Amino acid sequence: MKNLLILHLESIARERLAVFASSFPHTRRLTRDARVFDRFFSSATSTLMVVTYLFHGNDFEFDRSSRFEGMRPAANNRHLFSILRDRGYAANLVCLNAFETHRPTRLAAWPDDLPPVFGTHDFTMLQQRFDALTDAEPFAIYVWDLITHIEHSLAVAPFASGLTDQVARACAVADDAIGTMLAALERKGKLANTVVVLYGDHGDDYWTHGFKGGMVHGTEPYTHITWTPLAIAGPSITPGVADGVATTIDIAPTCLALLGVDERLSFAHSGCDVLAATRDLAFSQNFTANQPDDRALGIAKAFAVADDNYNLMASSRGLELYAYRLDPGNHCNLLEFFDSTPDGGLALRAGLSNVNHFRAALPDNPRAVAHVDARFRTLRDRLSARVAAKRAYIEAAGVQPTYALDPRMFDVFARAPVPGGAPPSRPAAPPAMAPFEFSFKLSP
């Protein structure tokens, strides 16, 4: 039987992995021998949601609730590690937690039928625990290293010259832990029989899309937050770069397939084995489907869908569309350049700019305009259907979908205010879904 090791890259998106490349020598070495998913998107912008979605293989786990903090998941599918325990695996979760002494590690997505989570603030103790857990096979271990979380990275602040250096040093500490664990498995002769999954839960946004009360994640699912690393290494896995899209909810079924565990995830909206099937898009969200906007922090409940080029996001502000490979930070909402057509497509707005660079990109480039239009139609239809499925899921449990996203928002474009001029008019919306006063204005 093969072993399983899941390495959780806390608060690390593709962007951070690239910018702080020198802090990740062991991670980069692992990815060279792995199947790397170049278009992997996190299913949520919050760690606790992501971890829950990973273990249960779907992103509906909290959607019936108007909050998710402190809530138990719905368990639409059995927990991945509970399945493995029943197949003879020693299933454990270990966590490096800088606040363990006064804020012990707790995880609602870790069920009572599994051994308690092992948390420590001591790097050496973490390694000793990992070493002990890997003596006997088969093992399934989830490693959650919180040092790269913005709060936990304060542990290295006294040694850093500033915030950027602090983040870089935290990344180096996390990478060193990965290197030490892989070396331990290699020393024991067990690495060759271990499936290693390395993934990022979400990225951070240092206030580039609004201050959000100071929050750096848990905000709207822009791709610089959701576009995260995924690499899978192990027996029978051919190294290289996968072409298709993948997402968090695919990790559980992929692990089961790689370990030869024949258990179907029966929930209708479960993930898939991405080594056997290629998906064309991935969904992300920041809040539960029945959670209200957080007006105090200026955060809208939002849902996003990404394909190999674009990220479409829907919230109470309306729709936003980004060409994320050209604009990884999602700073230019392409819908600023378009009006909606009667058949639900896009028409380039007249008189936008006579600058040659812009004209070459869109007005004088009909194929590019047609591509945006075609993808927008598909993404809007698929995202609308996904949000509708979440509403139906809420109602099926007899819960009132009080804060579910108004379907009319799929007919509204989020637009920035006109500089120095009157804002564009906007359609009426139910009070619970009214746009933020200080934020985007909606198109007619």
Image (tube, rainbow, N blue to C red):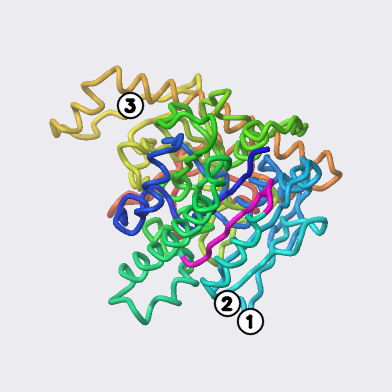
Q: Is residue 132 magenta?
A: no
Residue at the spot 16% in from the left edge and 33% down from the top edge: 357
Helix, strand or loop under label 3? strand
Could you tell me which secondary element the residue under label 2 belongs to?
A: loop
Residue at which label 2 appears: 99
Residue 356 falls left or right of residue 130: left
Residue 102's disc is 1
Residue at numbered disc 3: 348
Q: State the count of labels.
A: 3
Q: Nearer the viewer, mark 3 or mark 2?
A: 2
Give the residue at the far left of this rendering.
356
Tell me where the magenta segment starts and ends, as one range.
136-147
Decide if residue 399 is on the left or right side of residue 428.
right
Specify whether 70 is left or right of 409. right
Which image quadrant for residue 208? bottom left
Q: Amino acid at mark 1?
A: His
Q: CA distance from mark 2 to mark 1?
A: 6 Å
